[in-house]
Image (cartoon, rainbow, N blue to C red):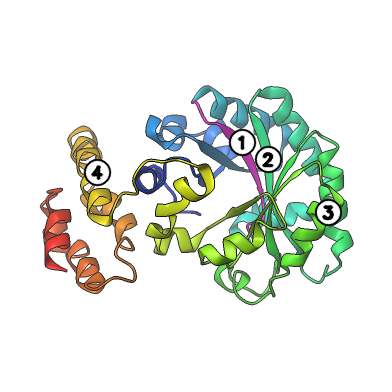
Amino acid sequence: MMDWTDRHCRVFHRQITKHTWLYTEMVTTGALVYGDVERHLRFSEEEHPVALQLGGSDPHDLAIAAKLGEQWGYDEINLNCGCPSERVQKGAFGACLMAEPELVRDCVKAMRDAVSIDVTVKHRIGINDSESYDFVRDFVGTVADAGCTTFIVHARNAILKGLSPKENREIPPLKYDYAYRLKRDFPQFEILINGGIKTEAEIDLHLQHVDGVMLGREAYHNPYLMATFDSKYYGDPAPVKNREEVLRAMMPYIAAQLAKEGGRGLKLNTITRHMLGLMQGVPGARQFRQTLSDSKRLAAGNPDLLLEALQGR
């Protein structure tokens, strides 16, 4: 999610779940082919397993970007064919690519030829008024010809004109059955479902029909939802960290990052802004958020602010 799931956010989430796959923000091919590669691709070793999500539509540039991702140590390359924003459309990538399945196939082939790690595709179930299941079925079938075997299905249409990205996450109806049908029609592929999923009970229901579930904004706003994922879905017997342990686990990382990059403009809030939802649903959550959002305290750049927020809630 753009401006949300940056490397600091992913390190925070990794304190809650060790095994859940994490995805980067979408990084455009232009930013890697012509921009500051280190700024966009650096990450901490503790983030593994982590996937690099790319935005682009030129097979050659995507191959270069994917190769860079592999060289930097990412575990998967994911092509975004689901973002509906007009800015992304102007770059001729994101959800509008679903109108050109043969181009997506060529992009995937170019990336798979360039790297040895998995190349996956995240997409919608349709665009604009293309409501038929046949549309997404044919899209998946075409892209699969390039050797892609993992599809992450945001189970809504993308409306490319007239709706904001936020409205595109809320107004087009969810059609989970389309993702279920994809799994039935393509049992040999890994089909993951995304869109509007907020509870463990919903996850369990979807897992009766598909291979995996992707959480977006709920994982960001209510990150402690993921605390039981390692034991329940990955069989890890390690004790579940409580919220205080998660908070304290972040303090050495924050101190190290500020010491290393504070002179380059890194601020405490750059990291702590991702942590505001940690106390979601427990008494004192509002006070916790207020303390971690206090501009004067944040300006001091002291990681002990996390303990103040914890004690003051």
Q: Nearer the viewer, mark 4 or mark 2?
A: 4
Does the stretch in magenta take in 80?
yes
Q: Which mark is residue 173?
A: none
Q: Is residue 261 left or right of residue 51?
A: left
Residue contact at pointers 2 and 1, CB within 8 angstroms: yes
| Structural distance between the alpha carbons of marks 4 and 2 | 32 Å
| Structural distance between the alpha carbons of marks 1 and 4 | 28 Å
* Amino acid at dot 3: Arg
Q: Which residues are magenta?
A: 73-85
Residue annotated with mark 4: 249
Residue 222 in the image: state x and y as whole percent.
Answer: 40, 63
Q: Secondary structure at mark 3?
A: helix
Q: Which mark is residue 184?
A: 3
Q: Secondary structure at mark 2?
A: strand
Q: Residues within 10 Å of mark 1 (few under 14, many from 20)?
A: many
Front residue (pair 230, 71): 230
Q: Is residue 298 left or right of residue 39?
A: left
Q: Nearer the viewer, mark 3 or mark 2?
A: 3
* Amino acid at dot 1: Ile
Q: Which numbered disc, 3 or 2, marks the residue that appears first in the sequence? A: 2
Front residue (pair 192, 68): 192
Quarter of image, res 249: top left
Q: Which mark is residue 120?
A: 2
Q: Is residue 225 left or right of residue 147?
A: left
| Structural distance between the alpha carbons of marks 2 and 1 | 6 Å
Front residue (pair 124, 286): 286
Q: Which mark is residue 77?
A: 1
